[in-house]
Image: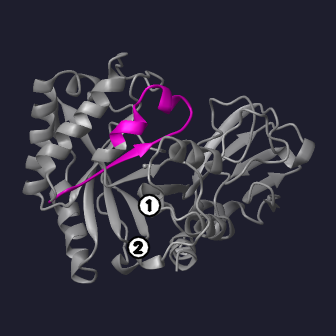
Amino acid sequence: MLRSATLLAVSLLAAVPASAGDLRVVAYVIGWEAAPPPIDPTKLTHINFAFGQIEGGKAVLRHPGVAANLAYLRSLKAKNPRLKVLLSIGGWEAEGFSDAALSAESRNVFAASVVALLREHSLDGVDIDWEYPGQSVSGIKSRPEDKQNFTALLQTLRAQLGKRYLLSIASADREYFDFTEMDKLHGYLDFINVMTYDFFNALTPTTGHHAGLYAAPYAAPNDRNADASIKQHLGAGIPPDKLVLGVAFYGRGFAGVKPEHDGVNQPYGRFEAAHPYAELVEKFIGRNGFVREWDEHAQAPFLWNAQTRAFITYDDPQSLASKAEYVRKHRLGGMMFWELSQDSGDALLDAIVNGLK
């Protein structure tokens, strides 16, 4: 996910559409701003308030204004009593998980601190965003034992949370499965937010659709896409209705891109920036030499500037409508997005809501 840990801040595919009333619309809302953006709670089923941190083995909320921000999110239930507000703990570079999960004692201490925070702020559950168990790619501490300890941590959380509170995680694909027990741990979870984005970024050698639903025509055999990620989750025996398809409310830009195929799956000179969708609408889409293109194979939009050889990959209402259809067709549990303040007048959120009807 596009975020920093220093900031407060889940077989085969079925073919029968899911009923819209059962589908989740999960919004990550950042908690380090002065206040969350205006929110229409009737469009959401869950809000994940991001992020809580881990200090001394305990879950904490350190940023100024957090109590007021959480009070505002709780107040939205007046308009939508079915809305659930969860605390998301972790994020990119978030330290402390490996130590918290290390022993039965440390797991109990962490779980008790989570329950205390949920009670203090009258929340509905917790979302665990450990990026990533058994891996130090973000610079955090990891251990080989994280694989089994993560399962044990979720088991302990489930025991202490009981049936009163929800428990979810944010998951990834490929090597994430090598360092977790996805075939076991899903039994302790209410749902899984599958991060099917950031497939192409500053760490990848080429450009590509960072949130593509399917592979592009020019994709390398090992390139990632959302469909492959979901199939990997289903292959671990996770029920489809526990899987919430993650989408991106931001794009990723690349500069100095080789011009073949309008910059898709091409080498580039440098990673340029991440851009909220609102910024793309205001400054890039159909502006300043950027032409919006559509990849029918990947079901993904992209921007190409032939003059400057700049490429931007992103999600838009058309791609989100396609993903919503995918969710319904394959009876998944809904859609999640990172993150709410990056939208442009609810254009993306409305595409999700309308697509899931």
The answer to which of 155 and 252 lies nearer the viewer is 155
Reply above or below: 223 against 239.
Answer: above
Front residue of 176/17: it is: 17
The boundaries of the magenta stretch are 164-185
Residue 98 location in percent, x, y? 28, 24
Q: Amino acid at mark 1?
A: Asp
Q: Residue 307: x and y, percent?
A: 88, 49
User: Percent x, y for residue 257?
Assistant: 82, 38
- In terms of image quadrants, where is residue 71? bottom left
How many labels sit on residues?
2
Horizontal and vertical percent position of residue 110: 15, 35
Judge the density around disc 2: few (<14), some (14-19), many (≥20) Cα neighbours within 10 Å. Answer: some
Is there CB contact under 8 Å for labels 1 and 2? Answer: yes
Q: For residue 175: magenta?
A: yes
Q: Which residue is mark 2?
A: 22
Q: Name the element at disc 1.
A: helix
The residue most toward the bottom is: 79
Q: Residue at x 40, y 62 (%)?
A: 27
Q: Residue at x 57, y 74 (%)?
A: 351
Of the numbered discs 1 and 2, the one sitting upstream in the chain is 2
- The image's mark for residue 348 is none
Q: Which residue appears at 34% of the width and 39% of the height?
A: 185
Q: Which residue matches tag 1?
A: 241
Residue name at image x 54 percent, y 71 percent: 352
Q: Is residue 215 above or below residue 136?
A: below
Quadrant hosting residue 80:
bottom left
Question: How far apart are the two marked residues, 1 and 2, measured between alpha carbons?
Answer: 9 Å
